[in-house]
Amino acid sequence: MIKVEVRKGQPIEKAIAIFKKKVKQSGLMIELRDRSFYSKKSDILRERKKKAILRNKYKVLKEKETE
């Protein structure tokens, strides 16, 4: 559970910004979006494989740039 304590004298807007940042870093909204409808196991595995291929592609490109 994500909690943000508002300190004395701290504006509410600042606390909201901190909360939004923590939610984004935790990946909570992405998980909620993914769970909003049922996905077959094969679809999940296919998506993971596509993401792994993309990660590898960008990793190779980055290595070529540094050389």
Image (cartoon, rainbow, N blue to C red):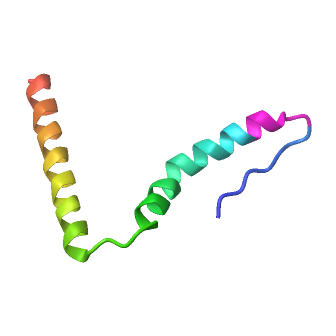
Q: Horizontal and vertical percent for residue 57?
A: 12, 41
Question: Is residue 41 located in the magenta-colored stretch of the structure?
Answer: no
* The C terminus sits in image quarter: top left
Q: Residue at x 16, y 54 (%)?
A: 50
Q: Quadrant of the N terminus?
A: bottom right
17 versus 19 height, above or below: above
Q: Which range is magenta?
A: 9-15
Answer above or below: position of 25 versus 1: above
Residue occupying the point 67% across, 41% down: 18
Q: Residue furthest bottom?
A: 41
Give the residue displayed 24% in from the left and 76% down from the top: 41
In the image, residue 52 sits, relative to residue 13, either above or below, namely below
Q: Vertically, is 22 above or below 31? A: above
Q: Is residue 60 left or right of residue 38?
A: left
In the displayed image of the protein, which residue is found farthest to the right? 8
Q: Position of residue 45 (x, y in %)?
A: 20, 68
Horizontally, residue 14 falls left or right of residue 63, namely right
Q: Position of residue 24 (x, y in %)?
A: 53, 47
The number of numbered discs placed on residues in the rendered structure image is 0
Direction front: furthest residue? 37
Q: Relative to residue 8, is residue 63 drawn left or right? A: left
Q: Residue at x 58, y 50 (%)?
A: 23
